Amino acid sequence: MEFIFHEKQEGSLCAQHCLNNLLQGEYFSPVELASIAHQLDEEERMRMAEGGVTSEDYRAFLQQPSGNMDDTGFFSIQVITNSTPFSLAGFPGNPLQLLR
């Protein structure tokens, strides 16, 4: 590796900058992470609907804002883990070893 990529954080887009710094390149934009968040929202909605679309729990769920993103630039840990082609759960202590 000739250099270490570092994307300076702008606004509250911690997840985007964290992922790009981890992966050592400009891989994610807020639009791409928002798309993943919307997919997760839809999956959650479908799972909640399995209990009945007329249930009080389902109706209450529909009234809640997304737990996967908001207008400030927040993205949930689920968005972060679903954005990578590998699991971050077992990520080694020295991630730069993966990039060699």
Image (tube, rainbow, N blue to C red):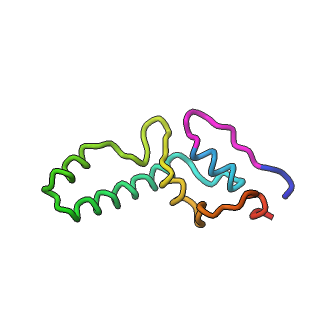
Percent x, y of residue 34: 46, 49
Residue 3 lies within the magenta run: no
Percent x, y of residue 17: 63, 44
Q: Relative to residue 91, is residue 38 depicted above or below?
A: above
Residue drawn where x is 75% and y is 64% of the image: 98
Quarter of the picture holding the N terminus: bottom right
Residue 12 lies within the magenta run: yes
Quadrant of the rendered structure where residue 47 is? bottom left
Q: How many marks?
A: 0
Instruction: Report the magenta residues as a range.
Output: 5-14
Residue 57 located left or right of residue 6: left
Residue drawn where x is 66% and y is 61% of the image: 91
Quarter of the picture holding the C terminus: bottom right
Residue drawn where x is 15% and y is 55% of the image: 55
Outermost residue, left direction?
54
Q: Relative to residue 100, is residue 77 depicted above or below?
A: above
Outermost residue, right direction?
2
Percent x, y of residue 96: 77, 58
Residue 41 located left or right of residue 79: left
Residue 13 located left or right of residue 55: right
Which is the main secondary structure of the residues drawn in magenta? loop
Percent x, y of residue 30: 52, 46
